[in-house]
Amino acid sequence: MARSTTAPSEPLGSLTQPGARSGAACRMCASERVTRISMELTDGTAVDFTHCLECEHRTWAQGEDLLSVEHVLVKAQRRR
Ligand SMILES: [Zn+2]
């Protein structure tokens, strides 16, 4: 008799699962071995940080839009 497993439990803290398919892929080398972290900048903007494990390329995205590193750094700074 075959038991069907439903909804495999996701282990917590496994951000670097190889083969984890969340639509994230490196923009440089198209590798799917990326670490993806959702974070919030100091101005309240929610961004997705993606770090490629293959080529070390890093990207920040706000929704569908890709943000440049300069853009993120400016946003992360407090203007005085
Ligand atoms: Zn890459």
Image (tube, rainbow, N blue to C red):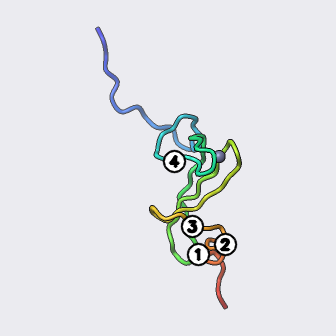
At label 2, the amino acid type is: Glu
Q: Is residue 3 left or right of residue 42?
A: left
Please tell me which residue lies in front, 27 or 21: 27
Which badge, 2 or 1, comes first in the chain's sequence? 1
In which quadrant will I find the N terminus?
Answer: top left
* Residue 76 coordinates in the image, percent (x, y): 63, 75
Q: How far apart, in angstroms, are the residues tagged by discs 2 and 4? A: 21 Å
Please tell me which residue lies in front, 10 or 43: 43
Q: Secondary structure at mark 3?
A: strand
Which badge, 3 or 1, comes first in the chain's sequence? 1
Marks 3 and 4 in Cβ contact (< 8 Å): no
Residue located beneath label 2 in the image:
70
Marks 3 and 1 in Cβ contact (< 8 Å): no
In which quadrant will I find the C terminus?
Answer: bottom right
Q: Secondary structure at mark 2?
A: helix
Mark 1 closeness class: few <14, some 14–19, many ≥20 residues within 10 Å: few
Residue situated furthest top in the rendering: 1
Residue located beneath label 3 in the image:
67
Please tell me which residue lies in front, 31 or 9: 31
Residue situated furthest left in the rendering: 1
Q: How far apart, in angstroms, are the residues tagged by discs 3 and 4? A: 15 Å
Mark 4 closeness class: few <14, some 14–19, many ≥20 residues within 10 Å: some
* Residue 34 coordinates in the image, percent (x, y): 60, 45
Which of the two discs, 2 and 1, sits closer to the camera?
2
Which badge, 1 or 4, comes first in the chain's sequence? 4
Q: Secondary structure at mark 4?
A: loop
